[in-house]
Image (spheres, rainbow, N blue to C red):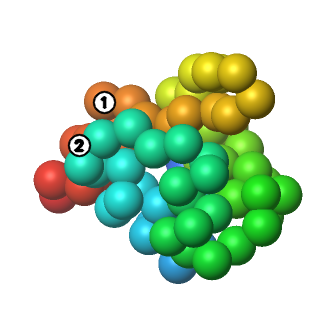
Amino acid sequence: MREFITLFRALSDGTRLRIIKLLEDGELCVCHLMEILDMSQSRISRHMGILKNAGLVNDRREGRWVHYSLNEGARRIGRA
């Protein structure tokens, strides 16, 4: 039950839903998300932490930037 609550809380925010839609086209760097969403790095990172905690995104570090992609579970949500 706790996993469902975490998932639904992650999906209850318009910005996080927009991030999921953006990631449907492929991996994005935090720097690109900052530009697209016109938000600070700290705000983007907070949203990404929530999405990662809910198991919706994967991350990888390249230099000083983190790149995010959707995991398979999130892709299924987008197709529903």
Q: Is residue 19 left or right of residue 78?
A: right
| Above/below status of 80 relative to 53 | below
| Mark 1 crowdedness (10 Å alpha carbons): few <14, some 14-19, many ≥20 | few
Residue type highlighted by circle 2: Arg
Tag 2, which secondary structure? helix
Please tell me how many numbered marks the rendered image carries.
2
Tag 1, which secondary structure? helix
Between 9 and 46, the one lying in front of the other is 46
| Mark 2 crowdedness (10 Å alpha carbons): few <14, some 14-19, many ≥20 | few
- Residue 30 in the image, given as x and y percentages of width and height: 62, 48
Q: CA distance from mark 2 to mark 1?
A: 6 Å
Between 64 and 3, the one lying in front of the other is 64
Mark 2 near mark 1, Cβ–Cβ under 8 Å?
Answer: yes
Furthest-right residue in view? 42
Image quarter of the C terminus? bottom left
| Above/below status of 68 relative to 11 | above
Q: Residue at x 53, y 55 (%)?
A: 32
Q: Residue at x 34, y 61 (%)?
A: 21
- Residue 57 in the image, given as x and y percentages of width and height: 50, 37
- Residue 71 in the image, given as x and y percentages of width and height: 39, 31
Residue 72 is marked as 1
Between 3 and 10, the one lying in front of the other is 10
The answer to whether residue 5 is seen in the rendering is no
Image quarter of the N terminus? top right
- Residue 66 in the image, given as x and y percentages of width and height: 65, 33
Quadrant of res 12 = bottom right
Residue type highlighted by circle 1: Glu
Q: Residue at x 72, y 44 (%)?
A: 49
Residue 20 is marked as none
Residue 76 is marked as 2
